[in-house]
Image: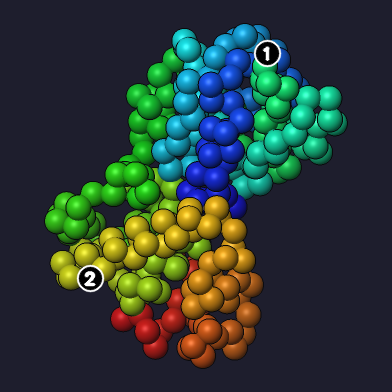
Amino acid sequence: MPELPEVERGRRQAECTLVGRQIVRVAAADDRIVFNGVTPRKFAAALKGRNVVAAHRTGKQMWFELDQPPHPLLHFGMTGRFHIYKDGDPHPRFWKVVFTTDAGDCLCMTNMRRLGRIRLQDDPPNEPPISQLGADPLNDLPPASELVTQLARRRSPIKALLLNQSLFAGVGNWIADEVLYQAKIAPHRLASNLSPCEVGMLRKKLSAVIRKAVEVDADKHKFPRTWLFHHRWGKVRGAVTSRGEAIAHTTIGGRTTAWVPAVQK
């Protein structure tokens, strides 16, 4: 499932393809599930001929700033991604929207499982869902002192809080597990019981994991070999980390959680 690094990769793809260009044509698939609050036909008509000023992202939500509203807001869901190709090439399978620029380039969003959403909004940062999101860990992670205050009020497992998009926008399951492993904090620990030192380490690792994943363009093959990421999948009995540490699996906040009891206290 796309998490913050994958969506940031998509934002950069859009920035390279669309920003500074005019949208000369929009193809919108007749999918009334993925298109939310606007018909595909109206979506396409509203964007044709518009100039793209910037590509933005908060958490897993992405929007293109145009020369005037409304602006397109995109969410990849579980299987969304962008494809870039030249005008005239066939659309890829499961395509939902294709933006064609005056340079002859196409940016296409596919969405196989149809859990993504495409919207039109006049002011995306100040409208739901973006207005309901918390801090983006890549762009505006709060200082440790502020996080200490925030977490001290929360009597929920720290794993569940990391997945709470109203606090940490864009953090998904594997990122939360990776951060807690590297910070040496057990996922079931109550957030309010973490020491200021532990919160500081949590913040440090959250920033480091996300920045590294973004640095390598969300290419999992380039993630450090010591990461839990490479060994956490599938609830495999007897799974161990690259250091030989036994991996356990449990469910916290309704999500499968991989952790290392020998390391995380």
Horizontal side, residue 217 vs residue 212: left or right: right
Q: Residues under labels 1 and 2: Cα distance? A: 52 Å
Label 2: which residue? 198
Q: Residue 220 occupies which quadrant of the picture?
A: bottom right
Other residues around mark 2 within 10 Å, as few (<14) / some (14–19) / many (≥20)? some
What's under tag 1, amino acid-wise?
Answer: Val
What's under tag 2, amino acid-wise?
Answer: Glu
Which-is-in-front pick, marks 1 and 2?
1
Does 242 appear above or below 132?
Answer: below
Horizontal side, residue 69 vs residue 145: left or right: right
Q: Residue 228: x percent and y percent? A: 50, 74
Does 148 appear above or below 247?
Answer: above
Label 1: which residue? 24
Q: Which of 211 and 38 is in front in this view?
A: 211
Horizontal side, residue 116 vs residue 104: left or right: left
Question: At 23% across and 65% down in the image, what residue appears?
Answer: 199
Q: Residue 26 occupies which quadrant of the picture?
A: top right
Question: At 48% across and 12% down in the image, what residue appears?
Answer: 67
Which color scheme did the rendering employ for the protein?
Answer: rainbow
Q: Residue 135 occupies which quadrant of the picture?
A: top left
Question: At 19% across and 57% down in the image, what residue appears?
Answer: 144
Question: At 78% across and 25% down in the image, what residue appears?
Answer: 87
Q: Residue 84: x percent and y percent? A: 70, 36
Viewport quadrant of the C terminus: bottom left
Does 133 appear above or below 162?
Answer: above
Q: Residue 263: x percent and y percent? A: 37, 84
Q: Which of marks 1 and 2 is nearer the N terminus?
A: 1
Q: Is mark 1 on a helix, strand or loop?
A: strand
Mark yes or no: residue 42 visible: no
Q: What element carries label 2?
A: helix
Q: Residue 196: x percent and y percent? A: 16, 67
